[in-house]
Every structure is written in structure tokens, then in C-alpha cells.
Amino acid sequence: MRCAVISVCVLYFSALACDSRADDWPAFRGEIFSQQRGRAAGDKYPQEWSKEKNIAWRYPLPEAGNSSPVVVAGKVFITCPGDSGKERHTICLDRQTGNELWKQTVTYAARERTHNTNPACAATPAADEKHVVVWHGSAGVFCYDHDGNPLWKRELGLVNHIWGFGSSPILFEGMVFLNFGPGENSRLIALNVKNGETIWELPEADGSSGEPGPDGQKASWIGSWSTPQIAKIADQSQLICAQSTRLVACDPFDGKLLWYCTGLENLPRGNLVYSDPLLGQDFGAVFGGFNGPAIGFRLGGTGDVTEANRLWRESQRNPQRIGSGVIVGDHAYLANSSASLMQCVELQTGKVVWAERGPGTDHWGSVTLAGGLLYVTDQQGATHLFKPNPEKLEVVRSNEIGERSNATPAFSNGEIFLRTNAAVYCVRE
């Protein structure tokens, strides 16, 4: 009888541990798997807060940054610049109290081009139960354990673009995947999470820094700031990422290019992708940046699937799209960086079902589905909640913090973790 009780207890606490892991937010936009990205586990999250209400703690940050928090194993990880970007911090906080557990600082004094709206430390960390991996642009990729001990570092080359970097790493099956760039040395790369050694690389052919040539001639604006994700297609795990002119799918274990779909090219204005692909069960879409084209496609295939799988391409009247949307049912919901324009797009046809100006200002943060509502934080730091309603924009409420933000909140176990230019907040009822 005693053995049976012990067995039941072991199963019970094992289940609790599994639930805790499932409720983590380990990478940019949460899960790395395509159908869970931008979706919070659990069905109850705060819907109302302010600086005075439902704030469990506030951790001040030394400088502004665009990376987002991640939450794993009771800890919150965030990156933040210091000394005008010469210092690049990785900070670990206790999720319950907001107390700083440790901070690791990398010094990089060399010149690194970026834009004043995109400071250093734009990449969100990636974490599992043993590792925390951060990408500090030209300074390199760094891996720590959960106590802050350095495990390894890798210099992957110079990131040279007039608008800086912004893609974030992800962890999968003992590997770190990174969309390295933008710039002349852009590539998808896989590193061994144990030692940082390169497993494979897939170059992007047409990288550009965006800097004028020696004769003053305007350079082409080319680049991808998109974060990779893992999709299960025909029972095969595939690494999916939007590059500057196409969506690519490759084998995560050896880097073999499996298939690709073109249609994002938009020169002379610019081949630019800021947001992540949105992938459903059978269909997906990529929305280009800087008023560039959007494409819809069927998932899967071999080689160039543009003719066979591309369902639509919309190149006219597109808003500026920086943050990523989210799929709910047959529709994609987007919050754009053009006059606070929000949209509902039919995934299989590209038809804009509705497009309305929402509350607040422009959005650089991405949309998250949590507790049946859509959450998105605008550049003034207000988080807007609206319903995934394909009939109309239906705003539930807006919550003001009063500090600017270009980041995306993390959602874990009924709590929301906000990053502004000034601080990290835990929102808790």
C-alpha cells in the first residue's frame, strides 16, 4: 500500500513539473513550434492593470532595448544594453519577486551600425531548463547556465546594417538556431548547445548593409529580421524562416534546403522582412516589411514550390509591418506600425476581411492569444486587448503603463511580463 501511495505521489508531482514546463515562455513569442507560437498556455490572464494596479513588481533597466522577456523554471531572462550599447547585459530575475539573481555583461566597444529606434540587445534570449542563450550581434552568441555561469561563446562575424539586428535564437533538440544578419554575411546557422560549435550553415544570397556606396549611390535595402520556428510537416520536423525574398524550410539536423516559396522581393523599395511567418496546420503566410508584399502558401513540398503552393500575393496598399500577427481559426490578426492599423486577413485567400485603426499608437510588438483574447503592446507602452472576431475589430480594453515599448509581453502561469524602455514588469492579479 505504501508503495502505491509513493507511486501516486511521484506521478502527481511529475505531472506538476510537466505542467510547469509546458507553461514556460522559452523564446521570442513563446513556443518554438509553429502552431503554438504566439499562444499562451492556460485560460486566465490579467485583463486590467496600470502602474498602480495589478503590478507585482517592477525591475528598472539601465537603457532602452527592444528584446522581450522569456520565462523558464521560475526565472525571467532579459537582455539590455548599457553604456550606450558598449555593454550588453543578460539579466536573470526571480519571477515571483523580481529580485535580480544574476547579471552577465559583455563589453563590445567596436562600432556596430544600428538605428536609434533599435538599440543594441534587440534579440530576445532563448532558454531551456539548463541553458540560456543570447545573441549580442557582432559581439557574438553567449550561453550561460541558470546560475549565470558562462558555458561558451561564439563570434560569428560582423553584423553590419543601418537598422541593426533583431532576430532571436531558438533551442531545439540540442541545437541553437539563429537567423544571422542582416548584412552581407546573412545566413541561417545551427550551433551545438553544449559547446557552440557550428553544425551547419545556410547562406542568404543577397544580403546588404543598406549603406551608400563610395560614390554616394543609394544602396539596396535588403534584410530579414525574422526569427526561425519549427513546424511539423508530413511527420518531419522542419526549420522555417523568412529570408529577404522568400520563405525557406530546411532540415534542422543537417541544414538541407527542403523547399522554398518566393514572392517577397520588392526592389527598388527594399527586400525587407521584419515579422515572423504565420503557419497553420496546412497553410501559412508571410507579411513583408516597409510596405512590401505578403504571400500565402500551402506548407510542404520539394524545391521551389512557388508555382505549385503559393496561393496568393498581395503587393499593393500594404501597411508597415514590424511585429508578428497570430492565426486564430482561418484568419490572421495583425497589429501594424502604420497609424495603429489593425487587420484581419483570410489566410487562404489573402483577403483583408477588416482593417481598422485601433486605439493607441503604432505597434512594434507582436500579437499574442491568451485566455481567448488578443494582446498587443504599442510603442507608447499601452497593451490593447481585442477579440479574435473575423467580423469586426472589437476592443475589450487598453492598459497604460506610460513608458515606451517595442517589445512583446511574455505569458506564463496566469502572469504577464512586460518590457518597456525603462523596466520589466510582472502583471499579476
Image: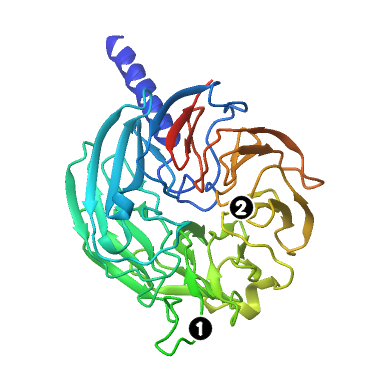
Taking depth in this image into account, of 296 and 426 the one nearest to the observer is 426
What colour-coding does the image apply?
rainbow
Q: Give the image quarter of residue 5.
A: top left
- Dot placed on the residue nearer the N-terminal end, 1 or 2: 1
Q: Position of residue 138 (x, y in %)?
A: 29, 64
Q: Is residue 135 visible?
A: no
Q: Residue at x 65, y 38 (%)?
A: 384
How much space separates mark 1 and mark 2, taking CA atoms? 32 Å
Question: Count the marks: how many?
Answer: 2
- Residue 92 as seen in the image, left or right of residue 228: left
Q: Amino acid at mark 1?
A: Lys
Considering the image in quadrants, where does the N terminus appear?
top left
Q: Residue at x 76, y 43 (%)?
A: 389
**424 shown above or below 188:** above
**146 shown above or below 346:** above
Q: Residue at x 53, y 26 (%)?
A: 51
Question: Mark 1 — residue?
Answer: 218
Q: Amino acid at mark 2?
A: Gly
Q: Give the image quarter of residue 372.
A: top right
Question: Mark 2 — residue?
Answer: 325
- Residue 374 as seen in the image, left or right of residue 186: right
Q: Give the image quarter of residue 166.
A: bottom left
Q: Label 2: few (<14), some or many (≥20) within 10 Å?
A: many
Q: Residue at x 30, y 36 (%)?
A: 92
Q: Position of residue 410 (x, y in %)?
A: 48, 39
Determine whether the residue tagged by mark 2 lies in a helix, strand or loop. loop
Foreground: disc 1 or disc 2: 1
Determine whether the residue tagged by mark 1 lies in a helix, strand or loop. loop
Direction front: furthest residue: 216
- Residue 102 is marked as none
